[in-house]
Amino acid sequence: MSFGASSCANSDPHPSRARGLLGAIYPVGMRGLTSPRLLAIAAALLGATSIVSAVTPEFADRLHAVSSVFGRDAPTVARTLVVAFGLALLLLSRGLARRKRRAWQLAFALVVATAAAHLVKGLDVEESLISVGFLAALWAGRREFVAPGDPESVRPLTQVLLALVVVMPIAVLHLVGEVAYSDIVDDGILILISALGLRAIAIWLRPTAEKVRNIPAERHRAEELVREFGRDSLAYFSLRRDKSLFFSASGMSFLAYGVVGGTAIVTGEPVGVASERPELLAEFQRVAHSKAWRVAIAGVSSEWLRDVTDLGFRSLYLGDEALVHPAKFSLDGRPIRKVRQSVTRLAKAGYTVEILCPADIQPALRNDLREVSAEWRGNWPERGFTMAMDALFEYDDAFVVVGRGPDGKVGGFLQLVPSPAASGYSLSQMRRRRDTPNGLMEYLIVETIAWAKNRDVAELSLNFSVAAEYLRADGGLLRTLLLAGDRLFQLERLHSFNRKFFPEWRRRYLCFERWTDLPAVAISYLQAESLLTPPSPWAGRTPDVSDR
């Protein structure tokens, strides 16, 4: 979004705060019970009422009257439809609460059909009148539903609807007794129709996807702000080309985010004038809610956490960032002897280190570095979104630490990006060839720390260790579960690697709007970090940080 974006005059400057159980389940765009929230609750109640009505016996005289007009099998078909409509309304209730236009459209059509089906299934005038009343309320609140749908959903939705068109006549013929099937076929048809129906609703209601706009003027402005205000070690990662930028009205601050699975994930702290942060985040929430996105913030520091929670966000400990202070770092002493031994061994073996800026990297070396990176990663996806860059040679103020063997061949490298206002650097990438000696990464990091010390660098951010506090614990169920998944996610291995340098641990948090959003937010965050993306079938072993 351009940095000229302005706030609505009547918008609440603070995010909404869910109150009570209903508030936790149904998000709102402003304080109090809004029309969409009321309609969402009413839709859920109508759906539940319809299901209960469909599974309870009808009045005999009413059922006889309906059967005489519509036929003996009509009430059975109508009862089945009422159950389906009721379930659909329950599913749609959250979409209504998020002000989704498509949820309103589908709910309106379903309520019309529900009102008619109640009459056909047993002349249930009471339920039909309730449906009509809710229909009037939906119409009255139609202007509140402004969140657009995903335009890319038309094609897959059409495919699902065509499948339903094929299956539904088969089911109807069976219901009216024209065709008989075995119990297995009956169950299969029911499961298939249910699955297709749920899939159709999910596609229809999926939120608008975000297409990143790399506008040169915005990117240049963001770079200026990072250089002037980028005190946090995550600030530079806001410049990734696959992140969208959202600027304050003054253009003096911005935040970076990505949209995954309907969740807008803000990475790190906003960069810029500190006093603008609350208003910037509140305006971003307003825009996100208008698109039916949840909002989450990954990598919130302890210093900023209070400000975020004051705005109504919930928080969950995410992990620890490992920071080394070059002026205080030393290889002396028994605790760090393994690192010291690795450095000594590799230096004696003839390994050398060269630290270059991208402009000084010649084409041949660039090809070597790309080859090392590809070999290390194998067929696994490139991981990292919050604390990693998306390219090697496109950021002029980054540095690449190259390690060469005695034969001059590149064995591994590091990439560093600055946190300019804090006189620090952050480690963005670590890559090595698989046939290099153990300890190469330790050697490169120690040499980097020495280089940083000579440049009066205040701090060097190594890696982020997810759930580090629990991994450091002596026992417990959570630690056991984390260790069980270490082969895939390598959380414990990365944490053990960081511990070798005796860093300062800086806590980071994941913040989100409601506790009921947490499962969806967690999945979106893992997807953004490529932790849920499997390798291709031909992938080799997982890149292992433990033998770096």
Image: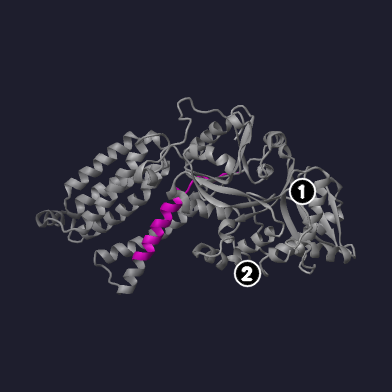
Q: Earlier in the sequence, mark 2 or mark 1?
A: 1
* Amino acid tagged 1: Pro
Along the horizontal axis of the image, is 351 left or right of 484? right
The residue positioned 27% from the left and 71% from the top of the image is 180
The amino acid type found where label 2 is placed reads Pro
Residue for badge 2: 537
Q: Residues within 10 Å of mark 1 (few under 14, many from 20)?
A: many
Residue placed most toward the observer, 494 or 390: 494
The location of residue 352, given as percent across then percent down, is: 87, 59
Query: If the image is split into quadrants, where does the C terminus sit?
Result: bottom right
Q: Which residue is mark 1?
A: 326
Residue 8 visible in the snapshot: yes
Q: How is the image coloured?
A: one colour
Numbered disc 2: secondary structure = loop
**The magenta stretch spans which residues?**
190-211
Question: In front: mark 2 or mark 1?
Answer: 1
> Depth check: 187 or 306 in front?
306
Identify the secondary structure beneath mark 1: loop
